[in-house]
């Protein structure tokens, strides 16, 4: 995960005071801590998905969806998320392979070639 640091000159992201990024295939998830006008911190969850609009010109844009979560809802949200994840883990009929394991997986489609080089 990556932590972002923003300067006051970056007006668009100036309200982000802490961030974590999750890279997940064609999607990127941002967990940003922001401060509202009253000085209260809240969580902004953003899903950003890369969309290729035109294959021939490789025109790309990013579709974004945001959720704002405020401190008074943290406990309810956390409880519901934990229950939901536990349900999925207990009831999923497909074996779960963590993304990190998939990325580190080496697929050999061809016979390896071995060289013996003498100097």
Image: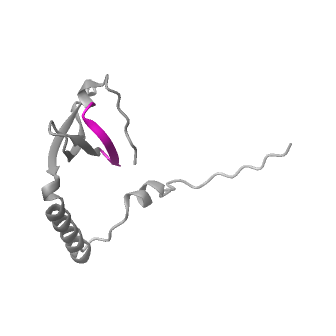
Is residue 3 toward the left or the right of residue 31 in the image?
A: right
Farthest right residue?
A: 119
Is residue 72 toward the left or the right of residue 7 in the image?
A: left
Write down the quadrant of residue 79 in the picture.
Answer: bottom left
- Quadrant the C terminus occupies: top right
Residue 48 visible within the image: no
Q: Residue at x 26, y 31 (%)?
A: 13
Instruction: Answer above or below: position of 68 versus 79.
Output: above
Q: Residue at x 23, y 73 (%)?
A: 86
Q: Position of residue 109 (x, y in %)?
A: 49, 54
Instruction: Answer above or below: position of 43 versus 86.
Output: above
Q: Main secondary structure of the magenta part?
A: strand
Is residue 63 toward the left or the right of residue 16 in the image?
A: left
Farthest bottom residue?
A: 90
What's drawn in magenta, residue-wise?
14-26
Closer-to-camera residue (59/19): 19
Q: Position of residue 32 (x, y in %)?
A: 27, 44
Q: Residue at x 16, y 66 (%)?
A: 80
The colour style of the image is: one colour
* Magenta stretch encompasses residue 76: no
Closer-to-camera residue (105/100): 100
Q: Position of residue 87 (x, y in %)?
A: 20, 74
Write down the quadrant of residue 76 in the picture.
Answer: bottom left
Closer-to-camera residue (115/84): 84
Q: Position of residue 16 (x, y in %)?
A: 27, 37
Instruction: Answer above or below: position of 42 versus 85.
Output: above
Q: Residue at x 15, y 47 (%)?
A: 67
* Tally of numbered discs: 0
Residue 112 visible within the image: yes
* Magenta stretch encompasses residue 16: yes
């Amino acid at each position: 995960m990556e932590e972002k640091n923003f300067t006051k000159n970056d007006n668009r992201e100036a309200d982000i005071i802490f961030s974590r990024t999750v890279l997940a295939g064609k999607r990127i998830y941002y967990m940003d801590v922001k401060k509202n006008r009253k000085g209260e911190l809240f969580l902004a969850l953003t899903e950003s998905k890369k969309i290729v609009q035109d294959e021939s010109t490789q025109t790309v844009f990013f579709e974004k969806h945001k959720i704002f979560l405020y401190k008074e809802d943290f406990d309810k949200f956390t409880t519901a998320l934990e229950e939901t994840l536990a349900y999925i883990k207990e009831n999923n009929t497909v074996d779960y392979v963590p993304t990190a394991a998939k990325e580190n997986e080496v697929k050999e489609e061809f016979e390896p070639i071995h060289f013996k080089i003498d100097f």
